[in-house]
Amino acid sequence: MNEGMRTFDELVAEAENVSVAGWDFSWLDGRATEQRPSWGYQRLLGERMTHARAALDIQTGGGEVLAGASHRAPLTVATEGWPPNIAKATRLLHPLGVAVVADQDEPPLPFGDAAFDLVVSRHPVTVWWEEIARVLRPGGSYFSQQVGPASVFELVEYFLGPQPEQVRAGRHPEQARRAAEAAGLTVVDLRAESLRTEFHDVGAVIYFLRKVIWMVPGFTVDQYRDRLHELDALIRSRGPFVAHTSRFLIEARKLH
């Protein structure tokens, strides 16, 4: 059924009850679109894995990105902290020879010094640079795609109102560069892009905010029902809600 023909209550009920486990956004197919960064993280990840003997994927989510890479190191380990994702990643990655370790993403990482020659992470919530440097072998690299500053803030501010400049400036790629260098790593690549994102119905917005829980902390339909009703009317009359996703790619090397 065309989403525009469905009532507000129907869209809400569906989006409230669908599972948000894992890091697969295929439920949004046809309901939301997001430009992809030009660099192609998963392709580059596979290329780097071909040169690694031991690799670590931090905050793997449901393991979808790592599983979809063209190559994995002979010894590859993934960490994840959210129980539904741990179970999903285990089912997906174990048949590929990848060990999944439950870890709450608080220092220290549960590995010895110089354990890996490649550490990767796609969209980490937090980055513990000193720990990354510790578990990397000399000559090893950290390779990561991260969420940049004020990402999808058109949607965030629709619900929360204007955000302070210090909040809007958080997660800036130059902050990542400084933190990496402070941990003793040398940044060899740093790129950033702003990418158009469209939400075609209010159910897509609800699903997104339930899944990406830090965008509107504590989001529930009941709390924001009035704003969701207004958003539903806005999309029906004017078309998709447009926001801009911020992404950056960083690669840092441990030289010594």
Image: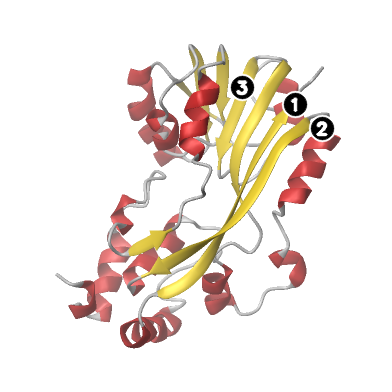
Query: In this orientation, does residue 218 appear?
Result: no
Residue 155 lies, in percent from the top left, at 51, 72
Residue 80 lies, in percent from the top left, at 51, 34
- Numbered disc 3: secondary structure: strand
Residue 42 lies, in percent from the top left, at 47, 35
Query: Residue tagged by mark 3?
Result: 118
Q: Report the amino acid beneath label 1.
A: Ala
Q: Name the residue rendered at 46%, 73% in the picture.
A: 242
Residue 183's disc is 2
Residue 5's disc is none
Q: Name the residue rendered at 33%, 28% in the picture.
A: 91
Quarter in which the N terminus is drawn? bottom left
Query: In this orientation, does residue 79 appear?
Result: yes
Compared to 75, does 13 lie above or below?
below
Q: Report the amino acid beneath label 2.
A: Ala
Compared to 128, does 113 lie above or below?
above
- Numbered disc 1: secondary structure: helix
Please rate how many residues cluster around mark 1, counting C-alpha atoms within 10 Å: few if below 14, some from 14 to 19, many from 20: many
